[in-house]
Image: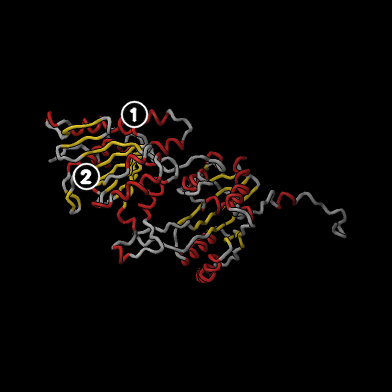
Amino acid sequence: MELDVSLHPGQVSIYNSKARFKVVAAGRRFGKSHFAAAMLGLAALQNTHKGYKLTPENKVYYVAPTADQARRVMWPKLRTLLGYQKQGGFIKRENVNDGWIELISGRQIFIKGADNPDSLRGEGYSYVVLDEYADMKEMVWEEIIEPALMDVEGDALFIGTPKGKNHFYKLFMGAIDKPTPPNWDPVEMGMDSPWDEWEAFHFKSVDNPLLARNELKRVLAGRGGSRDHIRQELEASFVSGSGKHLKPEWFEIVKDKKLPQGNVVVTVDLAGYAKSDGKHKPRSDETVIAVTWVGPEGWYVLNIEHGHWDVREVALRIVRTCSQHPGCTLGIEQGALKNAVLPYLEDEMRRLNRFITPHDLKHGNQKKLDRIVWALQGRAQRGMVKLVEGPWNQWFLDQCSDLGDPLSHDDGPDAVAYVDQLASTVWADMDDFEDLWEPQDLVSGY
Protein backbone atom coordinates (compact mmCIF):
# COMPACT_ATOMS: atom_id res chain seq x y z
CA MET A 1 0.00 0.00 0.00
CA GLU A 2 1.43 3.35 -1.05
CA LEU A 3 0.35 6.83 -0.06
CA ASP A 4 1.13 9.58 -2.54
CA VAL A 5 1.91 12.73 -0.56
CA SER A 6 3.32 16.05 -1.77
CA LEU A 7 5.82 17.68 0.61
CA HIS A 8 7.87 20.84 0.28
CA PRO A 9 11.67 20.74 0.96
CA GLY A 10 11.40 21.63 4.65
CA GLN A 11 8.91 18.84 5.28
CA VAL A 12 11.04 16.40 3.25
CA SER A 13 14.05 17.09 5.50
CA ILE A 14 11.99 16.08 8.55
CA TYR A 15 10.67 12.97 6.82
CA ASN A 16 14.18 11.86 5.79
CA SER A 17 15.51 12.06 9.34
CA LYS A 18 16.24 8.69 10.96
CA ALA A 19 15.65 10.05 14.47
CA ARG A 20 13.08 8.25 16.59
CA PHE A 21 11.85 11.43 18.25
CA LYS A 22 11.58 14.59 16.15
CA VAL A 23 10.96 18.03 17.64
CA VAL A 24 9.81 20.60 15.09
CA ALA A 25 9.51 24.30 15.94
CA ALA A 26 7.84 25.97 12.98
CA GLY A 27 6.19 29.28 12.20
CA ARG A 28 2.52 29.67 11.35
CA ARG A 29 1.44 28.28 7.95
CA PHE A 30 4.63 26.25 7.53
CA GLY A 31 2.49 23.21 6.82
CA LYS A 32 2.72 21.46 10.19
CA SER A 33 -0.75 19.92 10.09
CA HIS A 34 -0.39 18.64 6.52
CA PHE A 35 2.91 17.00 7.40
CA ALA A 36 1.46 15.51 10.60
CA ALA A 37 -1.48 14.03 8.64
CA ALA A 38 0.93 12.48 6.14
CA MET A 39 3.03 10.91 8.88
CA LEU A 40 -0.06 9.57 10.67
CA GLY A 41 -1.31 7.97 7.47
CA LEU A 42 2.05 6.39 6.64
CA ALA A 43 2.45 5.05 10.19
CA ALA A 44 -1.05 3.48 10.20
CA LEU A 45 -0.45 1.78 6.85
CA GLN A 46 2.68 0.00 8.10
CA ASN A 47 2.53 -3.63 9.22
CA THR A 48 6.02 -3.81 10.74
CA HIS A 49 8.24 -1.44 12.70
CA LYS A 50 11.85 -2.08 13.74
CA GLY A 51 11.32 -5.83 13.44
CA TYR A 52 8.07 -5.80 15.41
CA LYS A 53 4.89 -7.04 13.74
CA LEU A 54 2.24 -4.37 14.16
CA THR A 55 -1.35 -5.30 15.00
CA PRO A 56 -4.52 -3.25 15.55
CA GLU A 57 -3.48 -3.10 19.21
CA ASN A 58 -0.55 -0.86 18.26
CA LYS A 59 -2.36 2.41 17.87
CA VAL A 60 -1.41 5.57 16.00
CA TYR A 61 -2.38 8.72 17.91
CA TYR A 62 -2.75 12.37 17.06
CA VAL A 63 -2.92 14.50 20.20
CA ALA A 64 -3.76 18.22 20.25
CA PRO A 65 -4.23 20.47 23.31
CA THR A 66 -8.02 19.90 23.27
CA ALA A 67 -10.28 17.27 21.72
CA ASP A 68 -12.24 19.93 19.85
CA GLN A 69 -9.05 21.38 18.39
CA ALA A 70 -7.83 17.91 17.42
CA ARG A 71 -11.05 17.18 15.49
CA ARG A 72 -11.14 20.58 13.78
CA VAL A 73 -7.51 20.47 12.69
CA MET A 74 -6.86 16.84 11.80
CA TRP A 75 -10.12 15.19 10.80
CA PRO A 76 -10.61 17.15 7.52
CA LYS A 77 -6.96 16.73 6.59
CA LEU A 78 -6.96 12.97 7.10
CA ARG A 79 -10.18 12.59 5.10
CA THR A 80 -8.75 14.64 2.23
CA LEU A 81 -5.33 13.03 2.26
CA LEU A 82 -6.33 9.39 2.74
CA GLY A 83 -9.73 9.26 1.02
CA TYR A 84 -12.41 6.63 1.52
CA GLN A 85 -12.11 3.02 0.41
CA LYS A 86 -15.17 3.29 -1.83
CA GLN A 87 -13.43 6.03 -3.82
CA GLY A 88 -10.17 4.09 -4.00
CA GLY A 89 -8.76 5.57 -0.81
CA PHE A 90 -7.48 4.14 2.46
CA ILE A 91 -10.22 4.87 5.03
CA LYS A 92 -12.29 1.76 5.74
CA ARG A 93 -14.54 3.24 8.42
CA GLU A 94 -14.59 5.97 11.07
CA ASN A 95 -16.21 6.90 14.35
CA VAL A 96 -16.42 10.64 14.93
CA ASN A 97 -17.85 10.36 18.46
CA ASP A 98 -15.05 8.11 19.71
CA GLY A 99 -12.48 9.88 17.54
CA TRP A 100 -10.90 7.20 15.38
CA ILE A 101 -10.35 6.30 11.73
CA GLU A 102 -9.68 2.71 10.64
CA LEU A 103 -7.65 2.17 7.47
CA ILE A 104 -7.74 -0.75 5.04
CA SER A 105 -4.61 -2.03 6.81
CA GLY A 106 -6.82 -2.82 9.83
CA ARG A 107 -4.99 -0.27 12.00
CA GLN A 108 -6.52 2.83 13.52
CA ILE A 109 -5.64 6.49 13.89
CA PHE A 110 -7.03 8.05 17.08
CA ILE A 111 -7.68 11.79 17.30
CA LYS A 112 -7.57 12.93 20.92
CA GLY A 113 -7.14 15.94 23.16
CA ALA A 114 -4.61 16.35 25.95
CA ASP A 115 -7.23 18.18 28.03
CA ASN A 116 -8.40 14.75 29.19
CA PRO A 117 -5.11 12.90 29.86
CA ASP A 118 -6.85 9.81 31.26
CA SER A 119 -8.37 9.13 27.84
CA LEU A 120 -4.85 8.52 26.56
CA ARG A 121 -4.00 5.82 29.10
CA GLY A 122 -4.14 2.06 28.65
CA GLU A 123 -3.12 1.95 24.99
CA GLY A 124 0.02 0.80 23.24
CA TYR A 125 1.30 3.19 20.59
CA SER A 126 3.49 2.68 17.55
CA TYR A 127 3.45 6.33 16.50
CA VAL A 128 2.26 9.57 18.10
CA VAL A 129 2.03 13.16 16.94
CA LEU A 130 1.84 15.80 19.67
CA ASP A 131 0.66 18.99 18.01
CA GLU A 132 1.28 22.28 19.86
CA TYR A 133 2.97 20.43 22.72
CA ALA A 134 3.74 23.78 24.36
CA ASP A 135 0.02 24.06 25.21
CA MET A 136 -0.12 20.64 26.91
CA LYS A 137 0.91 19.54 30.35
CA GLU A 138 4.42 18.12 30.49
CA MET A 139 3.14 14.93 32.15
CA VAL A 140 1.16 13.97 29.03
CA TRP A 141 4.41 12.94 27.38
CA GLU A 142 6.47 11.86 30.37
CA GLU A 143 3.86 9.85 32.28
CA ILE A 144 1.48 8.59 29.59
CA ILE A 145 2.72 8.60 26.02
CA GLU A 146 6.43 7.82 26.31
CA PRO A 147 5.87 4.62 28.37
CA ALA A 148 3.15 3.53 25.91
CA LEU A 149 5.67 3.57 23.05
CA MET A 150 7.98 1.02 24.64
CA ASP A 151 6.17 -2.13 23.40
CA VAL A 152 7.34 -1.71 19.80
CA GLU A 153 9.91 1.10 20.26
CA GLY A 154 7.45 3.54 18.74
CA ASP A 155 8.26 6.96 17.32
CA ALA A 156 6.96 10.42 18.16
CA LEU A 157 6.69 13.77 16.41
CA PHE A 158 6.45 16.97 18.46
CA ILE A 159 5.37 19.83 16.26
CA GLY A 160 4.23 23.35 17.01
CA THR A 161 4.94 27.05 17.30
CA PRO A 162 6.98 28.14 20.37
CA LYS A 163 5.20 29.70 23.34
CA GLY A 164 8.12 31.04 25.34
CA LYS A 165 10.66 28.84 27.08
CA ASN A 166 8.75 25.93 28.58
CA HIS A 167 8.76 22.12 28.34
CA PHE A 168 8.61 22.27 24.52
CA TYR A 169 11.74 24.42 24.63
CA LYS A 170 13.42 21.91 26.96
CA LEU A 171 12.80 19.08 24.50
CA PHE A 172 13.97 21.22 21.58
CA MET A 173 17.21 22.16 23.33
CA GLY A 174 17.74 18.61 24.59
CA ALA A 175 17.52 17.36 21.01
CA ILE A 176 20.15 19.92 19.99
CA ASP A 177 22.58 19.77 22.94
CA LYS A 178 22.19 16.06 23.71
CA PRO A 179 23.29 16.25 27.38
CA THR A 180 24.41 13.17 29.25
CA PRO A 181 22.93 12.42 32.72
CA PRO A 182 25.47 11.90 35.54
CA ASN A 183 24.82 8.15 35.90
CA TRP A 184 24.52 7.38 32.19
CA ASP A 185 26.70 4.47 31.01
CA PRO A 186 27.30 4.80 27.23
CA VAL A 187 28.66 1.23 26.94
CA GLU A 188 25.74 -0.37 28.74
CA MET A 189 23.11 1.74 26.98
CA GLY A 190 24.68 1.56 23.53
CA MET A 191 24.55 5.33 22.92
CA ASP A 192 26.44 8.38 24.15
CA SER A 193 23.33 10.14 25.44
CA PRO A 194 19.62 9.35 25.85
CA TRP A 195 19.09 12.25 23.46
CA ASP A 196 20.93 10.54 20.60
CA GLU A 197 17.54 9.29 19.36
CA TRP A 198 16.25 12.87 19.15
CA GLU A 199 16.58 15.52 16.46
CA ALA A 200 15.38 19.13 16.42
CA PHE A 201 14.18 21.11 13.42
CA HIS A 202 13.52 24.83 13.10
CA PHE A 203 11.58 26.47 10.28
CA LYS A 204 10.18 29.95 9.74
CA SER A 205 6.87 30.62 8.00
CA VAL A 206 8.82 31.84 4.98
CA ASP A 207 10.34 28.36 4.62
CA ASN A 208 7.03 27.23 3.13
CA PRO A 209 7.51 27.92 -0.61
CA LEU A 210 3.75 27.63 -1.16
CA LEU A 211 3.01 30.62 1.09
CA ALA A 212 2.28 33.78 -0.89
CA ARG A 213 5.17 36.20 -0.37
CA ASN A 214 3.03 39.31 -0.78
CA GLU A 215 0.65 38.02 1.88
CA LEU A 216 3.53 37.35 4.25
CA LYS A 217 4.90 40.86 3.68
CA ARG A 218 1.44 42.32 4.34
CA VAL A 219 1.17 40.52 7.68
CA LEU A 220 4.67 41.58 8.69
CA ALA A 221 4.03 45.20 7.76
CA GLY A 222 0.81 45.25 9.76
CA ARG A 223 2.49 44.13 12.98
CA GLY A 224 3.95 47.55 13.73
CA GLY A 225 6.36 47.34 16.61
CA SER A 226 5.31 43.90 17.85
CA ARG A 227 8.69 42.39 17.08
CA ASP A 228 8.53 39.69 19.75
CA HIS A 229 5.21 38.45 18.38
CA ILE A 230 6.65 38.24 14.87
CA ARG A 231 9.68 36.34 16.07
CA GLN A 232 7.55 33.84 17.96
CA GLU A 233 4.67 33.27 15.54
CA LEU A 234 6.35 33.64 12.15
CA GLU A 235 10.02 32.99 12.89
CA ALA A 236 9.39 30.25 15.49
CA SER A 237 11.79 31.72 18.04
CA PHE A 238 11.65 30.64 21.68
CA VAL A 239 11.33 34.11 23.18
CA SER A 240 9.38 34.77 26.32
CA GLY A 241 9.21 38.42 25.28
CA SER A 242 7.97 39.54 28.67
CA GLY A 243 10.61 42.21 29.18
CA LYS A 244 9.60 42.21 32.82
CA HIS A 245 12.92 43.62 34.01
CA LEU A 246 14.74 44.81 30.89
CA LYS A 247 12.88 45.76 27.73
CA PRO A 248 14.81 45.36 24.46
CA GLU A 249 13.51 48.69 23.14
CA TRP A 250 15.41 50.48 25.92
CA PHE A 251 18.72 49.58 24.27
CA GLU A 252 19.38 51.72 21.21
CA ILE A 253 21.55 50.09 18.55
CA VAL A 254 23.95 52.58 16.97
CA LYS A 255 26.39 52.37 14.09
CA ASP A 256 30.09 52.12 14.82
CA LYS A 257 30.74 55.20 16.93
CA LYS A 258 34.08 56.93 17.34
CA LEU A 259 34.67 57.43 21.03
CA PRO A 260 37.62 58.92 22.94
CA GLN A 261 40.37 56.44 23.75
CA GLY A 262 40.34 55.12 27.27
CA ASN A 263 37.39 54.81 29.61
CA VAL A 264 36.94 51.26 28.29
CA VAL A 265 35.96 48.51 30.72
CA VAL A 266 36.36 44.81 29.89
CA THR A 267 34.22 42.58 32.12
CA VAL A 268 34.41 38.80 32.09
CA ASP A 269 31.65 36.49 33.34
CA LEU A 270 33.22 33.03 33.50
CA ALA A 271 31.46 29.70 32.97
CA GLY A 272 32.65 26.10 33.05
CA TYR A 273 35.64 25.46 30.81
CA ALA A 274 33.97 22.96 28.48
CA LYS A 275 34.21 22.87 24.70
CA SER A 276 31.89 21.10 22.31
CA ASP A 277 33.18 17.74 21.12
CA GLY A 278 31.41 18.31 17.81
CA LYS A 279 28.58 15.97 18.72
CA HIS A 280 27.40 17.13 22.14
CA LYS A 281 27.31 20.81 23.02
CA PRO A 282 27.79 21.78 26.69
CA ARG A 283 24.57 22.95 28.32
CA SER A 284 26.31 25.14 30.89
CA ASP A 285 26.27 28.92 30.77
CA GLU A 286 28.62 30.59 28.32
CA THR A 287 31.72 32.57 29.16
CA VAL A 288 31.13 36.20 28.21
CA ILE A 289 33.67 38.96 27.53
CA ALA A 290 31.98 42.37 27.33
CA VAL A 291 33.73 45.56 26.16
CA THR A 292 32.03 48.77 27.26
CA TRP A 293 32.96 52.43 26.88
CA VAL A 294 31.94 54.56 29.85
CA GLY A 295 31.42 58.30 29.54
CA PRO A 296 29.23 61.25 30.53
CA GLU A 297 26.53 60.28 28.01
CA GLY A 298 26.28 56.75 29.35
CA TRP A 299 27.60 53.34 28.38
CA TYR A 300 28.33 52.09 24.88
CA VAL A 301 28.64 48.32 24.71
CA LEU A 302 31.23 48.00 21.95
CA ASN A 303 31.37 44.22 21.62
CA ILE A 304 30.45 40.98 23.37
CA GLU A 305 32.16 37.65 22.78
CA HIS A 306 30.45 34.56 24.15
CA GLY A 307 30.92 30.82 23.87
CA HIS A 308 32.00 27.55 25.44
CA TRP A 309 35.80 27.66 25.53
CA ASP A 310 38.51 25.76 27.37
CA VAL A 311 40.54 27.62 29.97
CA ARG A 312 43.48 28.37 27.67
CA GLU A 313 41.27 29.87 24.98
CA VAL A 314 39.46 31.99 27.57
CA ALA A 315 42.79 33.42 28.71
CA LEU A 316 43.90 34.13 25.14
CA ARG A 317 40.63 35.87 24.28
CA ILE A 318 40.85 38.08 27.39
CA VAL A 319 44.41 39.21 26.60
CA ARG A 320 43.60 39.84 22.93
CA THR A 321 40.56 41.89 23.87
CA CYS A 322 42.56 44.02 26.29
CA SER A 323 45.30 44.49 23.65
CA GLN A 324 42.71 45.95 21.28
CA HIS A 325 41.77 48.57 23.91
CA PRO A 326 44.96 50.06 25.45
CA GLY A 327 44.36 51.60 28.84
CA CYS A 328 41.24 49.56 29.51
CA THR A 329 40.20 48.31 32.94
CA LEU A 330 39.80 44.54 33.25
CA GLY A 331 37.44 42.86 35.69
CA ILE A 332 36.91 39.13 36.15
CA GLU A 333 34.25 37.46 38.27
CA GLN A 334 35.98 36.24 41.40
CA GLY A 335 35.87 32.63 42.54
CA ALA A 336 37.24 29.23 41.62
CA LEU A 337 36.87 29.82 37.89
CA LYS A 338 39.00 32.96 38.09
CA ASN A 339 41.63 31.13 40.12
CA ALA A 340 41.73 28.46 37.44
CA VAL A 341 42.24 30.91 34.56
CA LEU A 342 44.83 33.19 36.23
CA PRO A 343 47.93 31.00 35.55
CA TYR A 344 46.97 30.73 31.88
CA LEU A 345 46.22 34.45 31.78
CA GLU A 346 49.72 35.22 33.10
CA ASP A 347 51.27 32.89 30.50
CA GLU A 348 49.41 34.63 27.67
CA MET A 349 50.37 38.08 28.99
CA ARG A 350 54.06 37.13 28.99
CA ARG A 351 53.80 35.53 25.56
CA LEU A 352 52.06 38.55 24.01
CA ASN A 353 53.97 41.10 26.12
CA ARG A 354 50.73 42.70 27.24
CA PHE A 355 50.27 43.06 30.97
CA ILE A 356 47.14 44.17 32.80
CA THR A 357 46.02 43.61 36.37
CA PRO A 358 42.52 42.06 36.62
CA HIS A 359 40.17 43.47 39.25
CA ASP A 360 37.82 41.26 41.24
CA LEU A 361 34.16 41.46 40.28
CA LYS A 362 32.08 40.61 43.33
CA HIS A 363 28.53 39.46 43.93
CA GLY A 364 28.20 41.69 46.98
CA ASN A 365 25.85 39.13 48.60
CA GLN A 366 23.21 40.11 46.05
CA LYS A 367 21.09 37.76 44.01
CA LYS A 368 22.15 37.79 40.38
CA LEU A 369 18.80 39.13 39.17
CA ASP A 370 18.84 41.98 41.69
CA ARG A 371 22.41 42.88 40.78
CA ILE A 372 21.65 42.98 37.05
CA VAL A 373 18.47 45.01 37.49
CA TRP A 374 20.18 47.46 39.87
CA ALA A 375 23.01 48.11 37.39
CA LEU A 376 21.09 48.21 34.11
CA GLN A 377 17.41 48.97 34.55
CA GLY A 378 17.58 52.65 35.45
CA ARG A 379 20.35 53.42 32.97
CA ALA A 380 18.63 51.57 30.14
CA GLN A 381 15.28 53.27 30.77
CA ARG A 382 16.97 56.65 30.41
CA GLY A 383 18.67 55.57 27.18
CA MET A 384 22.11 55.53 28.76
CA VAL A 385 23.08 52.00 27.67
CA LYS A 386 23.59 51.80 23.91
CA LEU A 387 24.75 48.87 21.81
CA VAL A 388 27.18 49.31 18.95
CA GLU A 389 25.83 47.35 16.01
CA GLY A 390 27.16 43.80 15.87
CA PRO A 391 26.17 40.14 15.40
CA TRP A 392 25.77 39.72 19.16
CA ASN A 393 23.01 42.37 19.49
CA GLN A 394 19.98 40.05 19.14
CA TRP A 395 21.54 37.45 21.45
CA PHE A 396 21.97 40.11 24.13
CA LEU A 397 18.48 41.59 23.64
CA ASP A 398 16.87 38.15 23.83
CA GLN A 399 18.54 37.53 27.17
CA CYS A 400 17.40 40.94 28.42
CA SER A 401 13.83 40.18 27.36
CA ASP A 402 13.91 36.75 29.03
CA LEU A 403 15.65 37.94 32.21
CA GLY A 404 14.10 36.20 35.20
CA ASP A 405 12.86 33.20 33.19
CA PRO A 406 14.32 30.11 34.93
CA LEU A 407 14.93 28.36 31.58
CA SER A 408 16.77 31.32 30.04
CA HIS A 409 20.42 32.31 30.18
CA ASP A 410 21.47 35.71 31.50
CA ASP A 411 25.22 35.66 30.82
CA GLY A 412 25.17 38.76 28.58
CA PRO A 413 23.28 41.12 30.90
CA ASP A 414 25.32 39.78 33.84
CA ALA A 415 28.63 40.62 32.16
CA VAL A 416 27.50 44.13 31.21
CA ALA A 417 26.03 44.73 34.68
CA TYR A 418 29.50 44.14 36.15
CA VAL A 419 30.63 47.38 34.46
CA ASP A 420 28.91 49.21 37.31
CA GLN A 421 31.62 47.97 39.70
CA LEU A 422 34.50 49.31 37.58
CA ALA A 423 33.02 52.33 35.79
CA SER A 424 34.80 55.60 36.46
CA THR A 425 33.08 58.27 34.42
CA VAL A 426 35.19 61.22 33.30
CA TRP A 427 32.77 64.13 33.05
CA ALA A 428 35.15 66.59 31.37
CA ASP A 429 38.59 66.60 29.79
CA MET A 430 41.43 68.23 31.76
CA ASP A 431 42.01 70.57 28.81
CA ASP A 432 38.76 72.30 29.75
CA PHE A 433 40.39 73.58 32.96
CA GLU A 434 43.70 74.89 31.56
CA ASP A 435 42.51 78.49 31.12
CA LEU A 436 40.57 78.72 34.36
CA TRP A 437 43.64 79.33 36.59
CA GLU A 438 45.86 82.39 36.40
CA PRO A 439 48.72 83.17 38.82
CA GLN A 440 48.05 86.22 41.02
CA ASP A 441 51.73 86.77 41.82
CA LEU A 442 54.38 86.06 39.17
CA VAL A 443 57.12 85.70 41.84
CA SER A 444 55.41 83.28 44.20
CA GLY A 445 53.49 81.54 41.41
CA TYR A 446 50.09 81.58 43.05
- Residue 74 or 402: which is nearer the viewer? 74
Residue 268 rendering spot, x and y as whole percentages: 54, 58
Residue 73 rendering spot, x and y as whole percentages: 30, 32
Residue at the disc numbered 1: 214
Closer to the chain start, of discs 1 and 2, is 2
Q: CA distance from mark 1 to mark 2?
A: 47 Å
Identify the residue at horizontal 19%, vertical 37% (top origin). 5
Q: Is residue 189 above or below residue 39?
A: below
Identify the residue at horizontal 27%, vertical 39% (top origin). 36
Is residue 105 in sight in this rendering? yes
Q: Is residue 113 above or below residue 313?
A: above
Residue at the disc numbered 2: 57
Q: Nearer the viewer, mark 1 or mark 2?
A: 2
**Horizontal side, residue 47 vs residue 32: left or right:** left
Residue 10 numbered mark, or none: none
- Circle 1 crowding by C-alpha within 10 Å: few under 14, some 14–19, many from 20: few
**Horizontal side, residue 60 vs residue 228: left or right:** left
Identify the residue at horizontal 44%, vertical 35% (top origin). 229
Quarter of the picture holding the C terminus: bottom right
